[in-house]
Amino acid sequence: MSNLALILGVSASGVTNHTVLVTGLAGLLAGALSMGAGEYVSVSSQRELLEASAPSPNVGSALTQLDVDANELELVYRARGMSAEEASAHAAGVLGSADAGADRHQAVGADPGGHEAIGTGLGAAVSSFLFFATGALIPVLPYLFGLTGTTAVITAAALVGIALLATGVVVGLLSGAPPLRRALRQLMIGYGAAAVTYLLGLLVGGGLG
């Protein structure tokens, strides 16, 4: 969608077919690289935050390494406002479950795949680059095959329109919304953006002329 708007805007200004082609390829590469870099930074930062906030594997075993017994823990809990019976039961329960707690924390901390649900920065960058590049190539195809002028513009707009309708239908089916409505919304947004840049290209081309 963005590359179609770029190509139509440049084409409307009256430049040569070669200039439009170079602009489209430059827009494809710039957009794909920026999307890939953004995804890499985003996912890598998210993984780093999750890893930094994960509990230490030594948290659960810390209590067992302290030189404390049930009586001392009971005094601590009584000082916090518990009754003698509650403090005694709580202290016994904490000491009794300390080993199990240590095992749970170690399991979480030692799991190298604990954050695999969000993927890796490199994987997100590559997939984002490829998806953007694939979509941005569509409006460039007519110019790659030698079409020029109005024929190239109409063909590029038609190809992107088909792609927008298809993605709208898929999104509608996956989200449970009416596919036709989603498809038409995609088409209207895409063509709206392209029309604005095309008009701006005409204004710029007329001013330069």
Image (cartoon, rainbow, N blue to C red):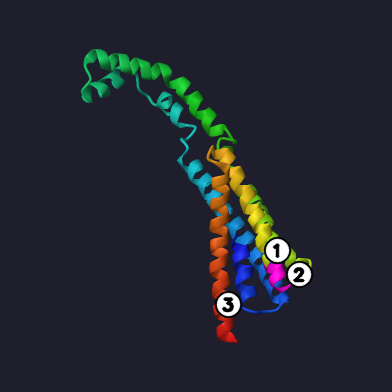
Task: Find the residue positioned furthest to the bottom.
Answer: 209
- Residue count near mark 1 (Cα–Cα under 10 Å), binned few <14, some 14–19, many ≥20: some
Q: Nearer the viewer, residue 108 or 206?
A: 206
View extreme (right): residue: 145
Element under disc 1: helix
Magenta segment, principal secondary structure? helix
148 falls in the magenta region: yes
* In the depicted structure, whether residue 147 falls above or below residue 128: below
Task: Give the Cα separation between the discs numbered 1 and 3.
Answer: 19 Å
The residue type indicated by label 1 comes to: Thr
Instruction: Specify few, some or many for label 3: CA neighbours under 10 Å numbering under 14, 14-19, or 20 or more.
Output: some
Looking at the rendered structure, which numbered label has been put on residue 56?
Answer: none
Residue 14 lies in quadrant:
bottom right
Contact between marks 2 and 1 (CB within 8 A): the answer is yes
Q: Which residue is mark 3?
A: 202
Q: Secondary structure at mark 3?
A: helix
Amino acid type indicated by mark 2: Leu
Q: Earlier in the sequence, mark 3 or mark 2?
A: 2
Q: Does dot 2 land on a helix, a strand or a loop? A: loop
Kindly identify which residue carries mark 1: 155
Q: Earlier in the sequence, mark 1 or mark 3?
A: 1
Q: Position of residue 182 (x, y in %)?
A: 55, 47
Which residue corresponds to the image point at 52% horizontal and 33% vertical from the top-left? 109
> What's the residue at 64%, 66% (across, down)?
27
Q: What segment is highlighted magenta in the picture?
A: 146-153
Pick the front one: 166 or 64: 166
